[in-house]
Amino acid sequence: MNEPKSLQDWLGTEVEAFSVALRRPLEVHVTAMTVAPVMTPEVEAHVRNRVGPKSIDKYLSIEQSIALVALEAADLGHRISQYRYIERYRDHFQPADAAMRIAFHTHIHVMRGNEIYVIMERCKAWLVFAHDLAAALGLKPTKTHKELITRFGKSFERHLRERHKIVHAHERPSIISRFGSFTAADLDDSEVAGEALNMIETLFGVLMKAAGETDRPTAPTADVIKKLNDMRLAEVDRECVEMWTILLECADKLIDRTRMLPHEAVPASHD
């Protein structure tokens, strides 16, 4: 019996298959066109934004633009797959002291929201690039980048809103952000420490409820801590799959494959 694939292996296979399934049909389509396609100003602009001056001449062709859009799709997939490690870093990092521990957890909290935003914006830019390339190939593509932004906004509203609160000082920060703003020295002050304890109590109640604990102990047991940690990792994995699914479905809607010219020629029968 085969062992089930890990999320990392599954995503790796998915990303590779997506990149190949994107590139090969487009290359066959170009080969089958009776009139060779030309670089449009839109496609050239996309290429110039992605390639350094020393290599730009190599990529100023439709064929290399296809290779570039497929390569970027793979890069996006790998970045999405790496997102799941953000919440695992803390399991492999031993801070030198309390001040570094607080800073590390604060940065991890901020990094998660930032990474979702970066992935969203890069996926949006890639869909625009893929759309303009498909248009240059006469495939009359559908614009799907706005759908991606809408779906990311709904699926990751909490993270994106939290990122906005952290960046913009006029927004009231969340409990986690406020707690993360305390330094080790701050907690030596009895008044500040009391405020931090109130936050911990509120957060503790939420976490215990999420863990299904009805009779709340004064401190979480090892079983409860493990359960909460498993829930945290399962959630970040779910978010990882959700991001990949959104990108894949928006990319699938972008090109009407019935407009693509025939794929490989069918071999003659030897019957």
Image (cartoon, rainbow, N blue to C red):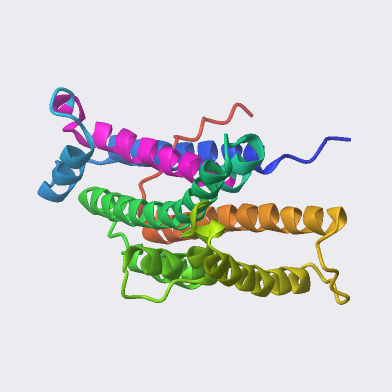
User: What secondary structure is the stretch in magenta mostly built from?
Assistant: helix
Q: Which quadrant would residue 59 be assigned to in this image?
A: top left
In x, y percent, where is residue 72?
36, 39
Residue 28 seen in the current view: no
Location of residue 249 in the rendering, given as x and y in whole percent from the top left corner: 49, 59
Name the residue furthest left: 41
Residue 50 visible: yes
What segment carries the magenta color? Answer: 56-84
Residue shown at 53%/39% (left/top)?
Answer: 17
Apparent side of residue 222 relative to residue 101 in the rendered image (left or right)? right
* Quadrant hosting residue 34: top left
Question: x, y percentage for residue 191?
Answer: 54, 70
Please state, as top left, top right, bottom left or bottom right, where the N terminus lies in the image: top right
The front one of 64 and 167 is: 167
- Left or right of 242 in this view: 228: right
Q: Residue 9 is drawn in which quadrant?
A: top right
**Front-most of residues 32 and 84:** 84
Residue in the picture at 68% in, 52% down: 233
User: Where 24 falls versus 182 (above or below)?
Assistant: above
| Residue at the spot 81% in from the left edge and 63% down from the top edge | 219
**What residue is drawn where x is 60% and y is 35%?**
93
Q: Is residue 76 above or below residue 271?
A: below
